[in-house]
Amino acid sequence: MPNVRPQPAHAPAHPLRWGEPFPEAAHETLANGQMRRNLAHATRTIRDKRLRVTAELPDWEALRDAGAAIKHQVMSELPALLVELERNVTARGGHVHWARDAEEANRIVTDLVRAKGADEVVKVKSMATQEIGLNEHLEAEGITATETDLAELIVQLAGDMPSHVLVPAIHRNREEIREIFAGRMADAPAGLTGEPRELAMAARAHLRAKFLTAKVAISGANLAVAETGTVAVFESEGNGRMCLTLPETLVTVMGIEKLVPTFRDVEVFAQLLPRSSTGERMNPYTTLWTGVTPGDGPQEFHLVLLDNGRTKALADEVGRQALHCIRCSACMNVCPVYEHTGGHAYGSVYPGPIGAILTPQLLGTGTKGSLPHHDATASLPFASSLCGACYEACPVKIDIPTALVHLRGRMVEAEQRRPLPTGWATAMRSAAAVMTSGSRFAVAARAAGLGRVAARGERIGRLPGPLAGWTSVRDVPAPPRQSFRQWWSQHESEER
Amino acid sequence: MRIALFATCIAETMFPQAPVATVRLLERLGHEVLFPPGQACCGQMHTNTGYLDQAVPVVRNHVAAFAPVLDGEWDAIVAPSGSCVGSVRHQQAMVADRVGDRGLARDAAAVAEHTYELSELLVDVLGLTDVGAHFPHRVTYHPTCHSLRMVHVGDRPLRLLRAVDGIDLVDLPEAESCCGFGGTFALKNAETSAAMVGEKVRNVISTGAEVLTAGDYSCLMNMGGRLSRHGTGVTVAHLAEILASTREAPWEPAFLPRSAQAVKP
Ligand code: SF4
C-alpha cells in the first residue's frame, strides 16, 4: 500500500517543529506529483466557493473590519478578559485550568480522563490539542483518543500528519482514502469503493459505536465569550455535536487568544468563519454551551486555557496579530506556495501563511538569545513570495506580508549576533553600500554592462553558486549594452 | 507637467528599456521628464530579505534624491514598477520608524504621496486611457502581485492596453496568481519558485500570445527567463514599452526569446 505511507514517514518529535527547514522539506513534497494534483484541485475548489459566498454579502468588508477590531480589543485587554471568562465559567458550574505549556496541558487533561476511570475518549477536531500532541501523549498513558472529524480520522488511521488546518487530509484523494479505511479501520465493510457516500457511511458506522460508549470527550473551541462564559464549536459534520452532548464529561482545550468580549461579538465570527473556511453561508452545526446544565449534556465541564508561547507572541508589537487568527484556513487556500508544496513542508501543525508567522513566534525563534540558524522554523518567514493573497483573503485582516517581513528582520538580527557573517549578510551589506549613492550606483550599473562578456548572445544560461536554482529552469537576460543612466545623459544632451 | 522619473535599480541596470519607454511615452504626451541623479534603490530588496537596518541608509538616499518634489520642484514622481512603488508607500516609513527615525519616516511618507506607478499616473493624474499607441501583436497581461495588492492599480493597465491601436489582447488564465519571483524568494526557495513560474508559463502559453506584458520587470524577468528556456517564442515587454510604441517608432524587443533569435540574421 504505497499510497498509505505516512507523510512525513517519521513521527514528529515536536508538533510545532517536525525537523527540516522549509526549502528541504519542500523538496520532498514538490516531488510528490499526486499530492500536488490533489492539493491544486482541492484548494482551487474551496477558493472559488469562498469568493462566491463572500461576494454575496454587501457588508463583507465591514464584517472583516469588525472582526479585526474585536481581535485588537481582545489582545489589548487579554488578562482582564481571561479573568472574566474564568469567573463566568466557574459561576455556571464549569472548572477552569491554566496551562503554561504543552506538558502542563497534557498532564491536566490526562489526570481528568484518569479521574473518570476512562481509557477511551472521543475527540472533536481541534488545533490546540494537535499543537500540544495530546493524542500521542494520551496513547503513551494508555488512553485511546478517537478523532471523530472525517478528515482527521483519515489522517489518524493513516498514521499521517495533517497538512491543512481545516481539511487535514486535503492531500489525499478518494482512492487513497478507500485504501486507508480498508487497511486500517477494523470494522470497515467488505468491498468498500471510493464513492464519497460509501466512505462517509463506513466512517459514520465506525464512529457511532464510539460516540455511544465514550464517557469523556475532548474538544477545542472556536471561541469563548468572556461576558457569559459560553464556549462555541463550529463544525460541518455533526460529530462535534455528538461529542459535546453525549459523554458525561467534556474537556475543552483552548488557546488563551480565542476570546471575544461579549455575546454580541459571536454574530461577527459566525458570519466570517464559515464563509472564509468552507465557503458555506453557514456551517451546519454550531454548538454553544455555558458551564453545565443539570440533566442536559455533559454534567462535568473543564476548560483548559493554554498559553504555550502565546504571551511571548503577544509581546511582539507587529507579530502579535498572528494571535487574531480564527483558523479559517482561507490563507492557505489562496497561497501559491502552499498550493505547490502542501502543508507538510511547513513542518508544523500550523501550515501555510499563518503557520509561517505563528509557529516561529510560539517557539520564540529569533528572539534574543536564540540562534535561528539551528532552528528549522527560522526558515518559515522566508517561505513566501510576499504576493499578499493571504492578507487579501484573511477575514480578520491579519497583515501577514508585513508580519513576515518583520519576522525576517528578527531572524536576521539573531543571525547577525553570530561572530561570522553569512554570505547573505555580506552580500546585503555591499549592496547597501552601492545603493546609498547615485554615483556609486552608476558605476556599478556600468560594471554590470561588462557582464555581457560572460553572456553568449542575449541571455545567460546555467550558472553555479547562488544563481544555480534560478538558472536551472530560467535564462537570465544579459545585461544591456547601455545602462539607463548612460542612455539618459545622451538623451539629455540631444535635447539641449 | 514636470515629472521626476524613479527608474528603479533593477530596470536601470538590467532593463533600461522600461524607463526609456517611460521617458519616450511621457515626452510624446507633452510632459517634461527629469532624472534625479542621486537615486539608486527604494530599499525593498533589503527590507524583504530581513536586512531592515541596512535598508535605512538606502531609504534615506531615496528620500533625499526625491525630496525636491516636496518644494514643488516637480509635479509628480513616476516609476515603471508596482513593486517599487509599493515599497515606497508601505515599507519606507515602516523601516524608518523601526529605528526610531521619525523625521525620515515623515519625509518618506510625504515623498510617497507624490509617487505613482505608471498606469496610475496616466489614468488618475493625466486623465488618459488612450495614449495613442500602436502595437499590432497578440498580448496577454499578468497583473503583478504588488501592483495588484499593495498599490491597487486595479484595471488601469488593462484600460490602457485596450485602447492601444492594433492590439489583440487576450485574457490570462489564473492571472492573479503569483509568478513565483518574490525577490530573493526565487533564490532562497528556488524549487518552489520554479514550480510556481512553471505553472504561470503554462497559462501564458495556453493563451497563444506572442507578447507577455506586466508593469514590473522583475516579474517579467522571472517569467521571461522561463519562457526563453522553454524556447516558447513568447517575448516579454513592459507595459511602458507597449504604450510607447507607435506606427512611426514601433517597439523593438530587447530580450528576444530563443526561437525568435534563431531566425535573426
Ligand atoms: S490567518 Fe486569517 S486567513 Fe489565515 S487561518 Fe487565520 S484567520 Fe484564516
Image: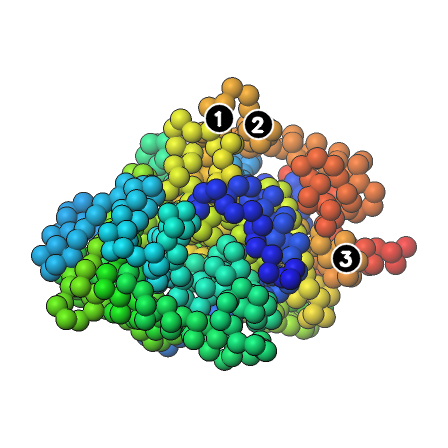
Question: Disc 3 sits on a residue from what chain?
Answer: B
The tally of labels here is 3
The kind of residue on which mark 1 rests is Gln
Q: Amino acid at mark 3?
A: His
Secondary structure of the residue carrying numbered label 2? loop
Q: Position of residue A141 (x, y in %)?
A: 37, 47
Task: Please tell me whether residue A33 is drawn above or below residue A109 in the rendered image.
Answer: below
Q: Nearer the viewer, residue B244 or A170?
A: A170
Picture disc at residue B230: 3
Q: Quadrant of the C terminus of chain B?
A: bottom right
CB of mark 3 within 8 Å of CB of mark 1? no
The verdict on label 1 being within 8 Å of ligand 1 is no
Question: Mark 2, chain letter?
Answer: A
Mark sitting on residue A416 = 1
Q: Position of residue B136 (x, y in %)?
A: 72, 69
- Whole-angstrom CA distance, mark 3 to mark 1, is 40 Å
* SS label for mark 3: helix
2 vs 3, front mark: 2
Q: Secondary structure at mark 1?
A: helix
Report the residue marked by disc 2: A422
What residue lies at 20% left-to-right and 69% top-to-bottom?
A: A297
Asked if marks 1 and 2 fall on the same chain, the answer is yes
Q: Are marks 1 and 2 in contact (CB under 8 Å)?
A: no
- Mark 2 and mark 3: span between their CA atoms? 34 Å
**x, y percent for residue A30:** 63, 54
Q: Residue at x 31, y 53 (%)?
A: A324
Asked if residue A188 is positioned above or below residue A459 in the image, the reply reads: below
Query: Between tags 3 and 1, which lies in front?
Result: 1
Percent of width and height locating residue B256: 77, 54
Q: Nearer the viewer, residue B175 or B105?
A: B175
